Amino acid sequence: MEIPVPVRPPLLTLPILEGRHELAITGLRREEESFTLHYRITPALPDREGETLVLPILEAEDDLGNEYDDRGGAYGTRPDGTCTDGSLTGRPHLHPDAGTLHIRITWLRSGEEASCGMTLDVRSP
């Protein structure tokens, strides 16, 4: 008998790319030298040959004034094609006293940019 795994609600959701997609921040992982935001985009971003890829770039600043750089990420379409799961990594590691993280993600596609901003509570539980 399989025990169902509880699904945690996203940390936040917002419309992106002119409202055609929804971005859900599904998790934040703190690491020794960086942090990683995990996200889900519904419906899925283009991912097939011949379609224009959409590349995200992260910029962030915490409420203490510390700035964080994009250090890459990865994403891919779920096998069922319903959404795109991905992650973005920022450096350096989050300051332990930071309460909020002001995030700007810029989506690049065919030489055009579309940005979205959000504030995420990053206080350790």
Image: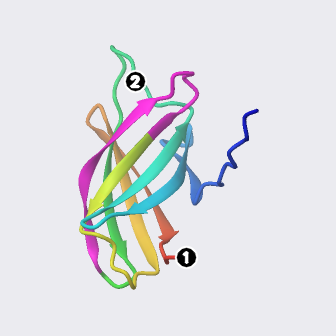
Give the answer, above or below, for where 78 lies relative to 51: below
Residue 31 appears left or right of 19: left
| Secondary structure of the residue carrying numbered label 1 | loop
* x, y percent for residue 106: 35, 50
* x, y percent for residue 125: 55, 76
Residue 119 appears left or right of 51: right
Query: Type of residue at label 1?
Result: Pro
Query: Type of residue at label 2?
Result: Asp
* x, y percent for residue 56: 34, 45
Span colored in magenta: 66-85
Give 52 or 94, whichever is nearer the viewer.
94
Which marked residue is nearer to the observer: mark 1 or mark 2? 1
- What residue appears at the point 27 percent right and 73 percent down from the top-left corner? 67
Residue 18 appears left or right of 113: right
- What residue appears at the point 51 percent right and 22 percent down from the top-left corner? 79
- What residue appears at the point 33 percent right and 72 percent down from the top-left corner? 94
Q: Please name the predominant secondary structure of the magenta segment in the image.
A: strand
Q: Residues within 10 Å of mark 1 (few under 14, many from 20)?
A: few
Q: Which label is found at residue 47?
A: 2
- What residue appears at the point 72 percent right and 34 percent down from the top-left corner? 2
**Which residue in the structure is indicated by mark 1?**
125
Residue 43 is one of the magenta-drawn residues = no
Q: Which label is found at residue 31?
A: none
Give 30 or 47, whichever is nearer the viewer.
30
